[in-house]
Image (cartoon, rainbow, N blue to C red):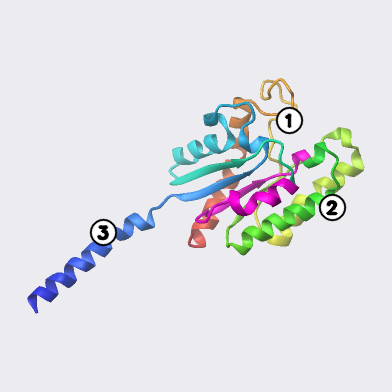
Amino acid sequence: MRFKAILFHFLVMSFMAAWPVAAQQPIQLVGFGDSLMAGYQLAPSQSYTAQLETALQAKGHDVVVANAGVSGDTTSGGLSRVDWSVPDGTDGVILELGANDALRGISPDETEKNLDAIISRLKERSIPVLLAGMLAPPNMGHAYSERFGEIYPRLAKKHDVPLYPFFLDGVVAVAGTQLEDGMHPNAKGVGIMVERSLPAVEAFLGDIRTAGK
């Protein structure tokens, strides 16, 4: 009997010792988007996902942010790869797509349909989404810009997901924050994007933890 009691005590203590390790696994985020997420012409350490991971960890968050950005990707391209670009075990996705749709003048209806499908696919896998909004460039005309700008709030409401209204906030038309092409952020610009979006991402992490992820 004493041997069984000792064995039981050993098993219980072993389980309790292992439990905190399992409970403290880092939250796995994936940044799913285009060149703005990928870090076009930047060193890997200067990309949005890398700088975001550093900023979150500096604030005490145990998190890993994987980069699933593909330069030139449209919402159609994102839809075609979402199933394999976002691995099993992902706790949350920051979804940033649509800029290239606007640059190519793709119908806002098509953009919305693709984003809708991407969010639906992720929800089917029980993966929370933080939707990063985008604005159409002014040269596309007022009517197009207005229709395009309505996509993200409408999808956020439909799917009940958090929305960060404009991914390039603080960078567009701000001197010293962009590459020579005048479209993509430089490392400094990405840093501003991270700083501006950090509260929304931290709130997203809180939602994930609350949901038991």
Q: Judging from the image, what secondary structure is the residue with disc 1 in?
A: loop
Extent of the magenta region: 76-100
Image depth: mark 1 or mark 2 in front? 2
Mark 3 → mark 1, Cα distance in angstroms: 50 Å
Q: Residue at x 74, y 24 (%)?
A: 182
Please provide percent x and percent y for residue 42.
59, 27
Image depth: mark 2 or mark 3 in front? 2
In the rendered view, would you say 55 is above or below 8?
Answer: above
- Residue 46 image-quadrant placement: top right
Q: Residue at x 48, y 44 (%)?
A: 64
Residue that carries the numbered disc 3 in the rendered image: 17
Q: Is residue 137 left or right of 62 when viewed as pictured?
A: right
Dot 2 amino acid type? Asp
Give the camera-side residue of 198 and 158: 158
Q: Residue at x 47, y 51 (%)?
A: 27
Dot 3 amino acid type? Ala
Q: Is residue 179 left or right of 206 when viewed as pictured?
A: right
Mark 2 → mark 3, Cα distance in angstroms: 53 Å
Please provide percent x and percent y for residue 163.
67, 50
Q: Is residue 6 left or right of 178 when viewed as pictured?
A: left
Indicate which disc, 3 or 1, sits on the residue closer to the N terminus: 3
Residue that carries the numbered disc 2 in the rendered image: 109
Dot 1 amino acid type? Val
The disc placed on residue 172 is: 1
Image depth: mark 3 or mark 1 in front? 3
Q: Residues within 10 Å of mark 1 (few under 14, many from 20)?
A: some
In magenta stretch: residue 99: yes
